[in-house]
Amino acid sequence: MHLSKLFIPLLKETPSEAKVKSHQLMLRTGMIRQSSTGIYSWLPLGFKIMKKIEKIVREEQNKIGAQELLMPTIQSAQIWKESGRYDDYGEEMLRIKDRQGKEMLYGPTNEELITEIFRSSIKSYKALPQILYHIQWKFRDELRPRFGVMRCKEFFMKDAYSFDINNEEAKKSYNKMFFAYLHTFKRLGLTAIPMSAETGPIGGDLSHEFIILAETGESKIYSDKRIFDIDIGNYNSNDDSINKLRKKYDAFYAVTDDKFNQQDFENKVKKENQLATRGIEVGHIFYFGDKYSKPLKCSIDLQDGKKVDVKMGSYGIGVSRLVGAIIEAKLNNNVMKWPNSVAPFEVVIIPSLQKKDKSNYKKAEKIYNFLIKNNIDVLLDDTEEHLSAKFKKFDLIGIPYQIILGSKSTDDKFEFKEVNSKTESLSLEEIKKKLLNNRNLN
Ligand code: 5CA
């Protein structure tokens, strides 16, 4: 892609309504555009990054055997009346009537709808366990939408739902998802810590929020620092290994504000290991047994002929929120570097093109064509801005590697820079090798 052709409405100034750095950067680099309070359009740059995040989320769900489907955004109020949540959900729920006067709503979450699908499809224990998920827009009429995509009204969420015959089996599904989440966030270049949390309107008595540290985060957290040293690479995906991994995490004190108890904190965590700070919730998993299956009459036949309400859990990841969360984690001194796994382009060519210096332009095109031929997603800055202005721009756009064509490049060696590192002088083959080798690093 050539920058002159890219739809990327950059802003010179930081809009005053943006209070946190992720929101500021997303507006400055034309990733999103507000359409009304708490509702955003995703422009090409932001959309491309979000789609890359979505792909990683999907791959890790598929790896644990979860199956993707797609439920609609608009749901019938009827099933919410059956579960009893229609009234409980309050003003956060956007309620709509169709032309026949039928009560509908824009789904804030999908426990009811998936239970309804399950109860009308599965009758026997033989079909269990099942984990189903979709990645779909949600709407919550938040009282105070803020921080851009972090807390907005319309957001993109991965929500998964597990169905098991008893608590023991259900715990295995919960643990699988726990494992998938740790791997998902790691691939996104984040260290997300599972913390014991309250269940709120979703319900149940077992739940973990996955939190990344950030001063601007909305969640207050209290933990034992050593929890950050757990290496998930030491565990594999069989049930025993995952169980050990969960125990390892659960052994350290790590809770959100609503579960915090000062006395417990003091007793369980040595002074030097105490960490009290803020974080962003990027995922949340719940186990709630038969909270929905009972009122919605979602039961299955067991081997001995008895009927039992299925045991369920639900598992959310804030896909659109993650775009902002990664910026909060990776933007340093006004320099952004996207993790390779989700970067909007793998590399950018930045030639000095002032005074229509044709030789640099030809060189840039040659490199561009070479990289494209090797299936490397490259951006070429073909504008005639001054080099220093180009560098400022790419500090914000955050493409992790740059090829700079200034006074120092020769015909076969080019200035190659990994953002936040020193410049090297490399041949095209060396550049290609480096980019391909680093593709899966973050
Ligand atoms: N049904 C459950 C799990 S599928 C559920 O809805 N959980 S949740 O309410 O915790 O939301 C899941 C994730 O969506 C959160 O961890 C958060 O990352 C994201 N999220 C929730 N509300 C918003 C919001 N208003 N704006 C952006 N992201 C949000």
Image (cartoon, rainbow, N blue to C red):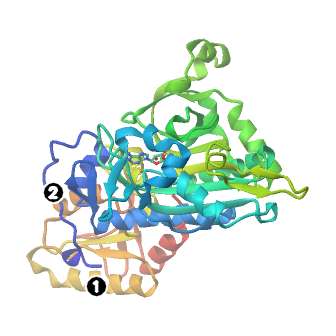
Name the element at disc 1. helix
Number of numbered callouts drawn: 2
Q: Residues within 10 Å of mark 1 (few under 14, many from 20)?
A: some
As measured in the structure, the alpha-carbon distance from the residue carrying label 2 to the one carrying label 1 is 27 Å
Residue in view at x 40 percent, y 76 percent: 377
Q: What amino acid is at disc 1?
A: Glu
Residue in view at x 60 percent, y 39 percent: 208
Residue 364 in view in this figure: yes
Verify CB contact (< 8 Å) between mark 2 and mark 1. no
| Nearer the observer, 41 or 412 | 41
Name the element at disc 2. loop
Q: Relative to 371, is 440 above or below?
A: above
| Nearer the observer, 13 or 135 | 135
Residue wearing tag 2: 11
Residue in view at x 16 percent, y 73 percent: 383
Q: x%, y% of residue 288?
A: 64, 41
341 relative position to 249: left or right: left
66 relative position to 239: left or right: left
Q: x%, y% of residue 379?
A: 31, 74
Q: x%, y% of residue 70?
A: 51, 68
Residue wearing tag 1: 365
Q: x%, y% of residue 27?
A: 23, 54
Q: Nearer the viewer, mark 2 or mark 1?
A: 2
| Nearer the observer, 63 or 377 | 63
Quadrant of the rendered image containing residue 417: bottom left
190 relative position to 248: left or right: left
Return the residue found at the far left. 355
Q: Relative to 412, is 269 above or below?
A: above
